[in-house]
Image (tube, helix red, strand yellow):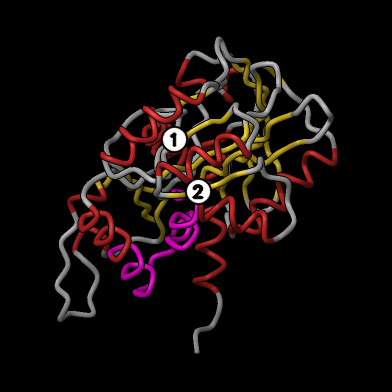
Amino acid sequence: MKRFLITGSKPGFHSRQLSSAFSRLGAESSFIPIDQLTFHAHSPNLPDLFKGCDGAVLRAIPGGSLEQIIFRMDALYTLERRGIVFLNSPKTIEKTVDKYYTSSLLAEHGLPVPPTIVTERVEEGLEAFHRLGGDVVYKPLFGSGGKGMLRLTDEKTAEQSFRELVSNGAVLYLQRFVQCDKQDIRVFILGGRVIAAMRRIGVEWRANCALGGKPAPYRPSPSVKNLALEAATVIGAELAGVDLLPAKDGTYYVSEINGSPAWRGLSLVSDVDIPGEIARYLLKKTSEIQATPQG
């Protein structure tokens, strides 16, 4: 019987759904908090928790000190080198948790991203505020669900916010606000396919479901599908939630890419069994790898 691990900060809705999906496919699964791993650097062996594991789904990298986060990423890379098949890979997670890393890669490949300026200096932040049209969104480099984001529309408030953020060790990641009628698009990608999508309609300028946004059915056009797939390919994501901003001029901007996408809201407006699709994909992938002659 195959055995899979679900790693993250703590078990919840998504890990339980994944566990049930693996069980329906005749596989075992268990949850392991990523911040409770112990490694013996002098030994090439896997930690006991990972012995006999066929693959793992990376749900989240919990926050912590710089030292803790670096160790957790190091641990994932170590596990990958020792044969654990991850969905997504540590390299992909490393890209998607960092908004600047993601947006710079997308821009380098010619994909449409909102005009973005990143700095650690308040003065440069104020200059960026004006260059971006005096209506900007500040986003924490790390984080999801719209948490910590600010929309700034006047210079005085922007300066006060920038000074407070910088004094607390933040980097000023600033994007021009895109007018899109309080809505965005989430495209869910798995293995190079768009398997589901939804429109999110916000109660304020942010449309995130975690902040009260309401999911609505959405059928993406071929061009929207292609944009989302290209964005996921640039990042190297097998599993991705690609967020698009539909601007009033008809442009679709790639806002963010989530490498550990949630599907609670999406499941309300889609008939796709998303946890089942993920479990089947990882089961097939690990079986193909194990069937391939090594060396």
- Kindly give the residue lying farthest to the bottom in the view shown: 295
Amino acid of disc 1: Ser
Q: Where's residue 88, x and y in %?
A: 48, 55
Disc 1 crowd rating (10 Å Cα; few below 14, some 14-19, many 20+) is: some
Q: On the rendered structure, is 167 left or right of 154?
A: left
* Residue 1 visible in the displayed image: no
Residue lying at 45% horizontally and 21% vertically, measured from the top left: 210
- The numbered disc on residue 45 is none
Q: Nearer the viewer, residue 32 or 184?
A: 184
Q: Is residue 211 above or below residue 54?
A: above
Task: Indicate the quadrant containing the N terminus: top left, top right, bottom left or bottom right.
Answer: bottom left
- Tag 1 or tag 2, which sits nearer the N-term? 2
Q: Nearer the viewer, residue 117 or 269?
A: 117
Whether residue 7 appears in magenta in the rendering, the answer is no
**Span colored in magenta:** 75-98
Q: CA distance from mark 2 to mark 1?
A: 18 Å
* Residue 93 visible in the displayed image: yes
Residue holding disc 1? 144
Q: Nearer the viewer, residue 56 or 147?
A: 147
Residue lying at 66% horizontally and 40% vertically, measured from the top left: 114
Amino acid of disc 2: Val
Q: On the rendered structure, is 249 left or right of 290?
A: right
Q: Where's residue 165, x and y in %?
A: 33, 36
Q: On the rendered structure, is 1 left or right of 175?
A: left
**Does dot 1 land on a helix, a strand or a loop?**
loop
Residue lying at 24% horizontally and 55% vertically, measured from the top left: 66
Residue holding disc 2? 118
